[in-house]
Amino acid sequence: MPAPKDLDPSSSPRALLGAELRVARERAGLSQAELGEPLFVSGSYIGQMEAGTRRITLELAQPIDELLGTNGFFVRNCAAAAKSKYPDHFAEAAEAEAEATAIREYAPLLIPGLLQTEAYAREVFHAYQPTAPQQVIDELTEARLARASLLSDPTTPLLWCVLDEAVLRREVGSKAVMAESLRHIAALIRARRIIVQVVPFSAGAHAALAGTLKLMAFEDAPPLAYVTGLGTGRLLDDPAEVAHHTLTYDLLTASALSPTNSLALIESVAEDYEHDQHN
């Protein structure tokens, strides 16, 4: 079998690298678990790299080349594939998100990135980086809006968001920005493109008070969970952890308003913002 060729970094490098990893592993006669053991990762982690839902990091590329005898192929090509327009703590999650068949997300404070309008995203980034040059804000906003192209397909991925009522009530930017943002979400709901539930303040304590949560399912790879903190994020593939976070999400949906009542609340709050603009 000929040696793998260096990849064109402009053509889905994660997917191409993953395919080459699978070929090289099978040629070496190793299972996913057998390759993962000396790398100190699980077999499912290897499967996610092969499926392109997780990137092959530079830290793993060198030992992979040594174990599989690929003559530096993965080191050379992972350098190009590692480039990302997203912050380091979110890059891998954003790449996985683009491959997901279903995304379920809980947002406690801000509208999820996939549902943000341009005006809302700009206000968020200005708040995060108040002294950043306008070019930086423009680039961050453009990258965030590009993620929303996932919703251009009428059916895939399934996007199910649970929003805390604080997301609706926290005025980001201005009343006009909030009205536009909530109307945007309502339009996507009415177009039957997304499912949204709101956890009302009246629900009291609930299962996800500690922070945000994103669950991602894939056609040919195990599910992932992504949890975030201030400037940090963790992409989790351990089956027990993913199962725990899946239960958390299920409990959230039980505490939330129905989709119909959630839409009514979203549109009511949007109307309040619109009314207040003119007073």
Image: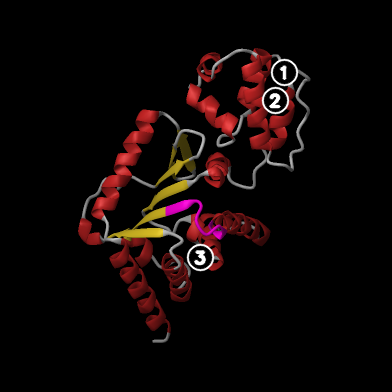
Q: Position of residue 274 (x, y in %)?
A: 41, 80
Q: Are marks 1 and 2 in contact (CB under 8 Å)?
A: yes
| Residue 279 seen in the current view | yes
Can residue 63 be seen from the camera position used here?
no
- Per the image, the residue denoted by label 3 is 120
**Direction from residue 66 to residue 42 in the image, left or right:** left
How many residues crowd mark 1 within 10 Å: few (<14), some (14–19), many (20+)? some
- In terms of sequence position, does the residue under pointer 3 or pointer 1 come before the other? 1
Q: In the rendered image of this protein, does residue 95 appear above or below residue 151?
A: above
Whether residues under marks 2 and 3 lie with C-beta atoms below 8 angstroms apart, the answer is no
Q: Amino acid at mark 2?
A: Phe
Task: State the CA–CA distance, disc 3 to disc 1.
Answer: 46 Å
Mark 2 vs mark 3, foreground winner is 2
Hey, which quadrant is residue 78 in on the image? top right
Going by the numbered disc 1, the residue's amino acid type is Thr
Image location of residue 276, percent across then percent down: 38, 81
Cα distance, mark 2 to mark 3?
39 Å
Q: Is residue 68 magenta?
A: no
| Helix, strand or loop at mark 3 | helix
Disc 1: which residue = 70
| Mark 3 and mark 1 residues within 8 Å of each other at the beta carbon | no
Residue drawn at (57%, 54%), measured in percent from left and top? 147
Residue at image location 45% in from the left, 31% down from the top: 237
Q: Secondary structure at mark 1?
A: loop
In terms of image quadrants, where is residue 271? Answer: bottom left
Q: Which residues are magenta?
A: 151-159
Instruction: Name the residue at the bottom extreme.
Output: 279
Which residue type carries mark 3? Answer: Tyr
Question: Left or right: where does residue 28 sit relative to residue 236?
Answer: right
Give me the C-alpha separation between circle 1 and circle 2: 7 Å
Q: How many numbered discs sit on the rendered protein?
A: 3
